Amino acid sequence: MPNSHKTIKVDLNNDYPCPCRRRSKLQPIVLTEAFGCDRCQQIFVLDEKGQVIEQLSSSYPYKRAWRWSGYRWIPLRPGLGQSSFPFFMGMMTMMLTVGLMLAWRSQISLLLWTILALLLVVLPAVIFWLVYRR
């Protein structure tokens, strides 16, 4: 069994399993550097180095990409600049800061505002983490 951390060059003449669905195969598209799935009809293009495939038509905010380990596709995570995580955490920090400033100026207990602000930040952060951790 090959090492899962090693990236193996993708051969355009071979058939591979589809990274999106089980029991489907990627087949090379003639005269291109691309593969097509026989079931989900998705098209995947090969990068310049021949080590990564990217989903051509995607409704995701970032390109989905995979590398071949020799026996399965390993999903690649988007870089920090391509992810919405830094923006999301900045917005949560801003909400927490504004909530605490409002608590300082209002007559309501600082402890109550702090708990409310933390719930407004922590709950969406946990939900975001649960959604994007895969």
Image (cartoon, rainbow, N blue to C red):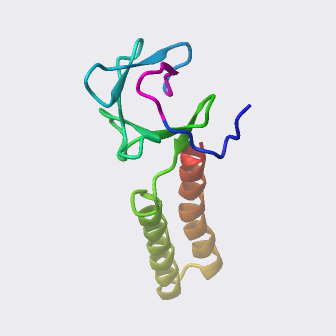
Residue 66 in percent (x, y) is at 49, 39
Q: Is there any visible trace of residue 88 in the rendered image?
A: yes
Residue 43 in percent (x, y) is at 33, 26
User: Farthest bottom residue?
Assistant: 105
Relative placement, left or right, of 107 versus 83 is: right
Q: Residue at x 56, y 79 (%)?
A: 108
The N terminus, quarter of image: top right
Relative placement, left or right, of 40 versus 3 is: left
Over which residues does the magenta segment extend?
10-19
The C terminus, quarter of image: top right
Relative to 54, residue 102 above or below:
below
Instruction: Pick the residue in front: 15 or 20.
Output: 15
Q: How many numbered discs?
A: 0
Residue 38 in percent (x, y) is at 40, 12
- Was residue 15 drawn as part of the magenta stretch in this picture? yes
Q: Residue at x 63, y 69 (%)?
A: 115
User: Farthest left residue?
Assistant: 31
**What secondary structure is the stretch in magenta mostly built from?**
loop
